[in-house]
Image (spheres, coloured by chain):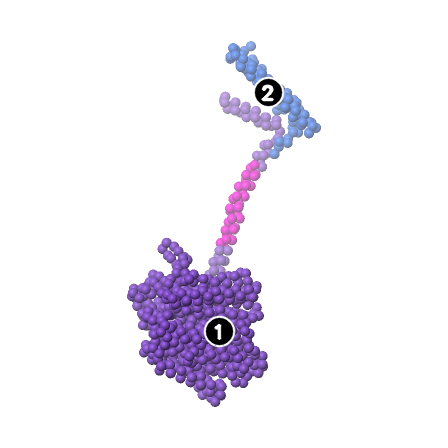
Amino acid sequence: MLPYSWLIPALPLLSFVLIVFFLIRSNKASSYTSIAAILGSLALSVAVLAEVLGNPQPQEFAINWIFMESFKLPMVMYIDPLTAVMVVMVSLVASLIQIYSLGYMHGDPRFARYYAYMSLFAFSMLGLVVAGSFFTMFIFWELVGLTSYLLIGFWFEKKIASDAGKKAFITTKIGDFGFLIGLLVMFFAAGTLNMAEIFDKVHHHEIALGTITAAGLLMFCGAIGKSAQFPLHVWLPDAMEGPTPVSALIHAATMVAAGVYLTARLMPLVITSHTMAMVVAIIGAFTALMAASIGLVQNDIKRVLAYSTISQLGYMILALGMGGYTAGTFHLMTHACFKALLFLGAGSVIHAVHTNDIQEMGGLGRKMKTTAATFFIASFSIAGIFPLSGFWSKDEIFAVAWEGGHYILLVVAVLAAFMTAFYMFRLCFMVFTGKPRDQEKYDHARESPKNMTIPLVILAFLSITVGWVGIPWLKHGYGSFVFFEHPHHVAPNYILMVISTIVALSGIYLAYLMYYKGSISPVKMAERFKRIYRVLFNKYYFDELYMATIIEPTYRLTEKLYKFDLGVIDWLVNFFGDFTVFLSWIQERFDTYVVDGAVNGLGYTIRAFGGGLRRIQTGQLQNYAFVIFLGLVVFILLRFL
Amino acid sequence: MTLYHYLILSAILFVIGMYGLLTRRNAVGVLMSIELMFNAANINFVAFSKFITPNEFIGQIFSIFVITIAAAEAAVGLAIVLLIYRNYKGIEVDNINFMKW
């Protein structure tokens, strides 16, 4: 089975090609092709997972791609437990979201193209996950960036959407550039980009520590960009301009997790280089806290979820930075389920009320029972309520921090968890409970169609249960399957469990008081902490900061360069152009009068000469005869005289 | 009668023929002048043969060839003259200038 795992990404690619070249005019055919392909990938992924469960030894397969005497660049696939888990997670979420999109994107003028992009994304993401060399990974890495760009700007008629697409592409490109340099550094240090070989060399201390740190941190830049970590997190909230299923699939569950996946793949470097580990952990922790605090005050339902995503990704990065390979990837998996569910729920709500602003919602739970119920389940899961998935994975991260003695990071993580619980339930209460704030929108709201609610229910089920594979009491749970070097067994830490539950519940309770009961007025709170509120509401002014420090100077620089171009370069070019024109004018004169004159003159001369000579030809035979005889006479005279 | 007498006769004939060739306006006259020149040549052949190689008849044989060719030439020439007459309504040689430039 494993040697055929290249089929997992190949099926969506086939579907993409089919849709683009043959089915683009048929909405039905293209959507069904795409869904069939991703379901096929899902089936294959499950088969791969089953096989890897039986034999967790990492396996590598190479397809020759560029092959020369001295230079080989194969497409390498690397299948280990993490890969197996990831392919199942990605293809599962992608399948559910593609089915959900049948309802959500219904009637869109570019429906078929949407499915083409979705297939292309599935191909790229699955390719990224199975990639076994950093080079192969980088190719797919850029491909997911491209599809992300295409899908964020899917409704490009809206300027804000096309701008968001550009922002996402350029911002992540900064990180990707670091990734690329990191790859080059690694290639020169290790002589290969094959993961297994690199890690072998790192393991045997064949690469200098400084090089490892430099290459690792540069490659981590890619993860910062893709996983929207501080300081490149600014693109993700804007990316919410894309269709909501896209946000769910790409900007919550899978693509943004690619950065975490990459960091997990870089685990040998993180373990070896203490500096790198610290940088990774601190960036993760800071991002988790910062994004969660911004999420507290946002009013756009998708933006709250976007900041929540950033914050949760920060968690995973934090876990990986502390060496918690199992914890980080475990949280990645559970988060994919409940965050996809949250986004799809939000999509369902937006589909019903046609607004993203939670201040115009309220009381929708009475009309959209399935959506509300699943959304609450997901919220409980992300808040970390026993015994839902989020509880187990978040607890695992706390436990890693605790065991490693990273108490400051632990406090930060707990604080972020409190905020997470608060903003999620602020969202829940404002959207689904209380009185409708906008009666007209409330009256028009209806529960979404079946093809949208069924994926919600499935994801809700997963949000509850998927974490159970990592329950610490299990002997052969997640930690004994996906681990780095040694099976990971965290003893159940009851103190942490109690603390995290208390924190989550208090967050929920605070949200309950403020947004359900109304005993604490949110407006008054905002008044009281006016300064903090404003900073949070404006997202720490990151956009403004980047605007002032990077974009504006760039504009000014380009303006100067433009003037330089116009004044100097263009002037020079024009000068040389004019000069050349002048030179050619002279040459043209020379040609006309000298060269042509010579040629024509020769012709004229010869013609004049011939004109004279031809008069000899009188046509009178007797003249000719006379000349002949004259010649004869002359000849004879010359002979004898 | 020595060789010189013959040669002088033939020279006179030849010069007369040449004069006729160059001056006659009538094409038939021109042809006749050419016959004179042929015959001057024939006399030369025969005279040389008789006085230089009296035992062989080389010159005589040559003159028979020349007479034959002259006959053929006269036939072709007269045919051309006839055609010219038809086309130009006359056989004045100075009118025939279609070989001009």
State the image coordinates of residue A454 (x, y, percent, origin top left): 51, 73
Category of crowding for the residue at label 2, using alpha-carbon neighbours closer than 10 angstroms: few (below 14), some (14–19), many (at least 20): few
Q: On what subunit does the disc labeled 2 rest?
A: B
Q: From the image, tell me which residue sits under label 2.
A: B69
Q: Quadrant of residue A317?
A: bottom left
Q: Is residue A530 above or below residue B96?
A: below
In percent of width and height, residue A293 lies at 43, 80
Chain letter, blue: B
Residue furthest right as drawn = B89
Residue tagged by mark 1?
A458
Q: Residue at x 49, y 58 (%)?
A: A577
* Residue A281 magenta-highlighted: no
Q: Residue at x 54, y 79 (%)?
A: A368
> How far apart are the two marked residues, 2 and 1, measured between alpha carbons?
123 Å
Q: Mark 2: which secondary structure?
A: helix
Work out whether residue A567 or residue A363 is closer to the camera in this orientation and state it: A363
Q: Mark on residue B79?
A: none
A332 vs B97, nearest the viewer? A332
Out of A614 and A468, give the one closest to the viewer: A468
Left or right of residue A362: residue B96: right
Confirm whether the magenta stretch covers residue A584.
yes
What stretch of residues is rendered in magenta?
A: A582-610
